[in-house]
Amino acid sequence: MASFTIKETILSPTTADGIIRWCVDEPFGNTTVDDLDIEKKGLRVSGWLLAEKNKPFQMVIIQNNSIIPLETNVERPDVIEKVLQKSSSGHEDVLCGFNSFVKLSSPYFQVGVIQQGRYQALVEYRVEGALKVIEGDRNWLFLDNDSNNSVEQYTGRLKLTRKERTYWKEYFQELVQYKESLGIHICMLIAPSKEMVYSEYYPHKRAKVTPIDQLEKLAPESFDLIIPIQELRNSDKRSYRVCDTHWSHYGAMCASIAVLSRQNKNIQAIEKLFSSDIYRTRHVTGDLGNKVFPPQKHDEEFLGSFNHQHFIVFDNQLPNFGRIRIIYYDDAMYDEVLLILGSSSSYTMFNYLSRVYKTVVFVHCAGNVDPSFIKRIKPDFIVSQSNARFIVRPPSAREDYTSFVREKAMLQQNKKIAPTVIKSDVVKESCHKNLKRIVGHISKLNNDAIASIPF
């Protein structure tokens, strides 16, 4: 559920020609409202107006060039007594108040009055989300005013500092060392920001050098840094959602293949497997569409022939950072373990990667690495995954996932959170030699982290 703030601009003095005094009580400036409340009940508009004698009036709302009458339906004896300083008993203007719920179809509207055939605007309102959203060409929505300064990164006004570049170099060096010492393939996938892939819909011009360009130069030649801008741009179907920051399910498939190609898998067999997938269209909002008012929707294709959630055997169900999930799909192509150290863009990749690797372990950590965790899991492959807009905050190669779980669980103490999911029967009956060990270790990490929270 999204929240919006009502911003107010006064357009007329409280006393005007033909008007003794007026006041709009609701909505008042900086009021927070929920989108569901506005959708179900509408927005309450209330107040009062006293007109000069023999000058009848009609209160109205103007939105989208439509005029919505506001009925004067409330007696306001307090107004008569305080403003006119007269007795309200039997006063002809005591019915001067209005109080109605109005369905809004636009983020902008005015409350005004029509008097003697003339319209006078009194107050203008605009409905704003917590985060601003850029509307590009063909109704494409893009992120704005976010904590990572996406626009500034794209336009080159914000670049990686010397200190941040040093941290990234150290991070890559650590990953190369893990790769060599553990003898397993490690790569990093950066999910491009939508404007990098569909720049033709974005109103800002890309700078010659952006943080993502700087990052590409920092990675050692021996390390697989994957930033699949061209693959996503040239995909057969649209790879990003119109009203969301994330790639589409088809885009997630393209990104998955980009990763698998670096892991020396049989790409032809994998592409053949994915080519038989069935997609279904749904009319949806997304994380940007629900930040504008009215909420904006678009037709999007979602994978309908496979759902990895049926094969989750462990999920601590913490929101975002600190979430750990294990997927076990017995019919996968390879009897191997893939560890994803990822972010929000990883979730739609599960539907594809879990059909390639029998066991997929996911930690929501945006590329931060816990060396002791890797040693205990003993994966065959590791993908560190983050989003392009996050790179101005370099990840660490020496983290402790226990602290991630503990901190997130502490923040959730006063909220309702779903209990940890463990499908013990599936784990017990599986033939995969590593699954029991992996689930056992992660369960212990999760339980120890929560047990260490001071109550």
Image (cartoon, helix red, strand yellow):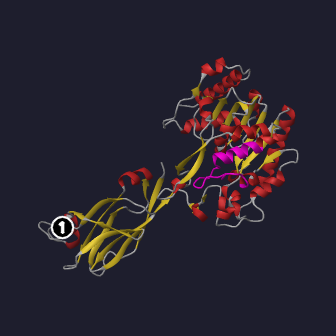
Q: Position of residue 352 (x, y in %)?
A: 69, 38
Viewer-proximal residue among 144 and 20: 144
Question: How many numbered tags mark residues here?
Answer: 1
On the rendered structure, is 43 left or right of 185? Answer: left
In the rendering, at what x and y percent does residue 208 appear?
A: 78, 65
Q: Residue at x 57, y 31 (%)?
A: 453
| Residue 81 appearing in the image | yes
- The amino acid sitting under disc 1 is Val
Residue 149 pos. (x, y %): 65, 59
Is residue 204 on the magenta stretch? no
Mark 1: few/some/many CA within 10 Å (<14, 14-19, 20+): some
Above or below for 149 versus 353: below
Observer-nearest of 139 and 110: 139
Q: Residue at x 37, y 61 (%)?
A: 27
Q: In terms of image quadrants, where is residue 79?
A: bottom left
The residue range painted magenta reads 233-258
Residue at image mark 1: 94
On screen, residue 97 above or below 171: below
* Left or right: where 415 falls relative to 361: left
Name the residue located 62 percent from the left edge and 29 percent from the top edge: 311
Q: 419 above or below 56? A: above
Pinpoint residue 407: horizontal percent, then vertical percent.
60, 38
